[in-house]
């Protein structure tokens, strides 16, 4: 995600920082690279021109006492990029919340609603999903199935063909919920009929927030869409979807900043927890390869179960883990959104060159490990050393799990490594908040960084 | 339809601007010519000092012209003759660069991907720089050159209906198989329903394969379309092998003498390698006659990456661009055509089944105002 753009931006700052003298030629070529990168990221043409003009100007004219010009230029670049992304505004829940989701067809409204529902349910809210997309075939089924999968309450009526009437039917049942998420049909602002439908619906629902769902790969049309949705349908915030893949979201993000529609979340995949709060600062720092610890910690918080954490902490203090714990640990890492995502958030790792397949293979290995663990006796799980002492056990378990002996060995190695980490002092102890501290995360990151040494 | 409104206007303004500028340039040349002639004359008559000659040359065009006319209103015919000689203008490389920057900006603004707009400009440069144009024709000439380039980029679409008829007439047994691919949420399922409807109206029987076994309610969605259109949908469970679903659908079609099988696949990000491999497998198993990429006409630069990776995996035969009713820029059509060198077959223009248009290259170019 965003790697190419990040690379160019990093290169630009590096080139400025390493320049002996900032002459016009250098600035021009940096500006050209920047322009290309931003345009390829679908940032509005006019905005790109403004930004690069400003950089050119400050490179040539401005001089601030006490600061070297290079540093000044890097700061200008950083500030300008930040202002392109707009200001932070979080979606803060009130006592009662009714949020209505709007957007073009296929932007990902329904999937996003399930993600948002899950996100806030995990944070102690009582969430109801309401399916009012009466137009697209099977839209309600989709919402219902997503809700079932993620244990959320969902209200849909398969017979009702009128969104307003459907809402009126559900309304009396919604008193117990403090967060009501309303799914609507895909529409664009030119379609008067659908705009009218939403206006009457809005009047009846009286939403606390109206959120526009917008795909990241939208091009130069982004601004117009954001503007029109904001003006006609009174959008209060935006969620940008499909931020994974090669789409850079430049169009969508900058359009929102320009129209002053705050971006609350970005979503980055098909899994339920592929959603992040959007913070321009941490987004930019990730883009520039500086990592984003805050988001990672936030994510860890959301997926780890407190009870399990407690148990793990105890065992860690005792200095030993069973194989089950190791697998549990690795699995919870998986539910963070996989290694690919964690990688992008750990400082220094974004830049590190990790062989493409390594992370993917890792994921495949973990599923194997689960099978292995299931084929082992409780005794073996508690003391994996047994396997090493009596190697016939290895071949037995391998047969039972349908894996090769080398898969077994790699698991044992991983287990040894984790155990060693725990034994080698209290470096991995868990602090009061139940989470590794920032410093420990950095250490971990370093370890990850040396991938070559660390064979999974 | 609002589509392409922006690009058309922009291109028009741009071409006008160039011709205007060239006109001014020509006039300037005339003026200088006039001036120096005039100056020579005055020099002879009044024995002016050389420095004044320079001054005269340096004067603004308007002033000198006025003074000229006041001085010598009778000799217009002479000047007219000079003027017509200089009316042929050449565009130098440097000048082109100035214009091209503007053209590039307007292409980019209209959602043409960076890579593609750079190439368009390079081609235009080769055609225009150094050529002589009559001043009056310069606008038309440049437009014509641009039109030629775009005409080359866009490939004449073939008719799916004809192809299906062609195949099913030859070998009465095998159905014509069409595989649809694309990223999430571009409108594959809706497009399939529209095309199935379109084929049905042309007397071609269809079956749909619900090979999107991943997304929630995807199977229900295509089944509902099938019900509405009265077309058989072959589906398995969620999570089952999409290639097997497609295979079964083809088998079903063979047995029941159905002409065409449309395979709906799950939306997949072109960066998810495993999923791309999965669709490769579907293609291997069912050997589609036609592989169609479904993209959004509002997608920006990312469309290039999308089509490239799908083309690399599947070798795409044609493109459908959806949501064309929202798009007023039209640049994406140029981008995909240029990268894939494959025709755009249809444009999706709305939610109803009949909201699908056969892509008309000439109409598209006409709409651009070229």
Image: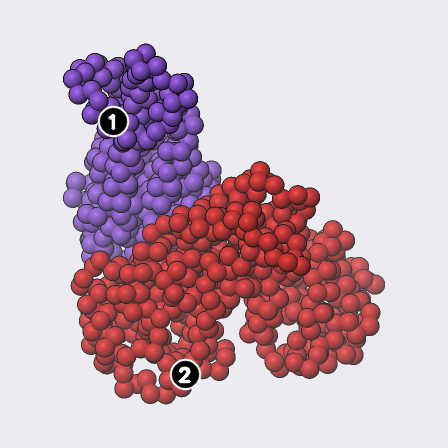
Chain colours: A red, B purple
Q: Observer-nearest residue: B188 or A444?
A: A444
Q: Observer-nearest residue: B269 or B176?
A: B269
- The percent position of residue B90, horizontal first and vertical second, equals 34, 20
Question: Total label count?
Answer: 2
- The percent position of residue B71, horizontal first and vertical second, equals 22, 22
SS of the residue at dot 2?
loop
**Marks 1 and 2, Cα distance to the nearest angstrom?**
77 Å
Q: Chain of mark 1?
A: B
Give the residue displayed 69% in from the left and 62% down from the top: A445
Q: Are marks 1 and 2 in contact (CB under 8 Å)?
A: no
Residue A75 in view here? yes
Q: Which residue is mark 2?
A: A94
Q: Observer-nearest residue: A53 or A289?
A: A53
To the question of a shared chain for discs 1 and 2, the answer is no
Q: Which residue is mark 1?
A: B67
Q: Chain of mark 2?
A: A
Locate the C terminus of chain B by quadrant: top left
Q: Residue furthest front?
A: B46
Q: Is residue A147 left or right of residue B154?
A: right
Give the residue displayed 60% in from the left and 63% down from the top: A292
For label 1, count other residues whose C-alpha is less than 10 Å away and answer few (under 14), some (14-19) or many (20+): few
């Amino acid at each position: 995600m965003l790697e190419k753009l990040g690379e160019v931006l990093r290169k630009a700052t590096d080139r400025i920082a390493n320049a002996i003298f900032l002459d016009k030629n250098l600035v021009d070529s940096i500006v050209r690279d920047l322009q290309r990168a931003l345009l390829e990221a679908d940032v509005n043409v006019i905005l790109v021109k403004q930004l690069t003009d400003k950089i050119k100007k400050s490179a040539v004219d401005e001089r601030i006492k006490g600061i070297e010009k290079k540093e000044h230029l890097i700061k200008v670049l950083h500030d300008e990029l930040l202002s392109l992304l707009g200001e932070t505004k979080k979606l803060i829940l009130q006592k009662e919340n009714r949020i209505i989701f709007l957007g073009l067809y296929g932007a990902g409204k329904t999937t996003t609603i399930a993600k948002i529902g899950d996100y806030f349910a995990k944070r102690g809210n009582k969430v109801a999903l309401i399916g009012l997309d009466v137009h697209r075939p099977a839209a309600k089924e989709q919402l219902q199935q997503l809700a079932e999968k993620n244990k959320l309450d969902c209200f849909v009526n398969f017979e009702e063909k009128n969104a307003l009437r459907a809402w009126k039917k559900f309304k009396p049942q919604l008193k117990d919920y403090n967060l009501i998420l309303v799914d609507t049909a895909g529409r664009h602002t030119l379609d008067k009929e659908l705009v009218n439908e939403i206006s009457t619906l809005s009047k009846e629902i009286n939403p606390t927030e109206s959120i526009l769902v917008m795909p990241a790969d939208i091009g130069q049309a982004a601004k117009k869409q954001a503007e029109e949705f904001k003006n006609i349908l009174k959008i209060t915030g935006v969620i940008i979807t499909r931020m994974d893949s090669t789409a850079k979201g430049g169009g969508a993000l900058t359009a929102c900043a320009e129209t002053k529609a705050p971006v609350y979340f970005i979503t980055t995949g098909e899994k339920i927890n592929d959603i992040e709060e959007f913070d321009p600062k941490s987004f930019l720092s990730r883009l520039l390869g500086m990592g984003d610890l805050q988001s990672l910690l936030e994510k860890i918080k959301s997926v780890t179960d407190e009870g399990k954490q407690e148990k793990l902490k105890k065992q860690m203090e005792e200095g030993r883990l069973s194989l089950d714990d190791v697998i549990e640990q690795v699995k919870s890492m998986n539910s963070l959104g996989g290694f690919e995502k964690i990688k992008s958030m750990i400082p220094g790792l974004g830049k590190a060159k990790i062989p493409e397949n390594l992370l993917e293979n890792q994921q495949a290995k973990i599923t194997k490990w689960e099978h292995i663990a299931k084929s082992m006796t409780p005794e073996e799980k508690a003391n994996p050393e047994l396997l090493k002492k009596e190697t016939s056990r290895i071949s037995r378990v391998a047969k039972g799990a349908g894996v090769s002996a080398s898969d077994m060995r790699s698991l044992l190695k991983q287990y040894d490594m984790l155990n060693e980490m725990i034994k080698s002092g209290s470096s991995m102890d868990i602090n009061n908040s139940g989470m590794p501290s920032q410093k420990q995360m950095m250490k971990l990151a370093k370890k990850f960084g040396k991938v070559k040494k660390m064979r999974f | 339809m609002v589509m392409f409104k922006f690009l058309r206007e922009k291109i028009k303004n741009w071409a006008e601007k160039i011709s205007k500028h060239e006109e001014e340039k020509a006039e300037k040349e005339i003026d200088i010519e006039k001036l120096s002639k005039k100056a020579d004359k005055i020099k002879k008559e009044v024995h002016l000092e050389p420095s004044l000659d320079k001054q005269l040359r340096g004067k603004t065009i308007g002033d000198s012209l006025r003074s000229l006319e006041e001085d010598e209103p009778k000799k217009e015919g002479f000047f007219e003759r000079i003027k017509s000689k200089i009316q042929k203008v050449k565009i130098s490389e440097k000048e082109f660069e100035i214009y091209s920057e503007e053209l590039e900006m307007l292409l980019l603004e209209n959602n043409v991907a960076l890579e593609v707009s750079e190439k368009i400009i390079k081609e235009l440069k080769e055609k225009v720089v150094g050529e002589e144009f009559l001043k009056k024709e310069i606008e038309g000439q440049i437009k014509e050159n641009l039109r030629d380039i775009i005409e080359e980029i866009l490939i004449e679409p073939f008719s799916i209906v004809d192809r299906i008829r062609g195949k099913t007439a030859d070998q009465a047994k095998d159905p014509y198989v069409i595989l649809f691919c694309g990223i999430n949420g571009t409108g594959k399922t809706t497009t399939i329903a529209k095309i199935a409807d379109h084929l049905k109206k042309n007397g071609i029987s269809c079956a749909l394969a619900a090979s999107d076994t991943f997304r929630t309610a995807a199977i229900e969605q295509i089944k509902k379309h099938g019900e509405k259109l009265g077309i058989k949908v072959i589906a398995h469970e969620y999570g089952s092998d999409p290639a097997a679903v497609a295979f079964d659908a083809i088998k079903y079609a063979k047995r029941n003498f159905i002409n065409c099988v449309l395979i709906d696949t799950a939306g997949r990000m072109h960066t998810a390698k495993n999923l791309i491999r999965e669709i490769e497998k579907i293609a291997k198993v069912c050997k589609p006659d036609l592989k169609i990429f479904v993209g959004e006409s509002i997608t920006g630069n990312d469309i290039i990456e999308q089509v490239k990776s799908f083309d690399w995996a599947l070798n795409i035969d044609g493109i459908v661009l959806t949501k064309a009713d929202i798009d007023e820029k039209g640049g994406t059509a140029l981008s995909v055509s240029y990268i894939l060198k494959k025709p755009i077959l249809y444009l999706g223009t709305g939610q109803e089944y009949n909201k699908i248009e056969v892509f008309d290259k000439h109409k598209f170019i006409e709409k651009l105002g070229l």
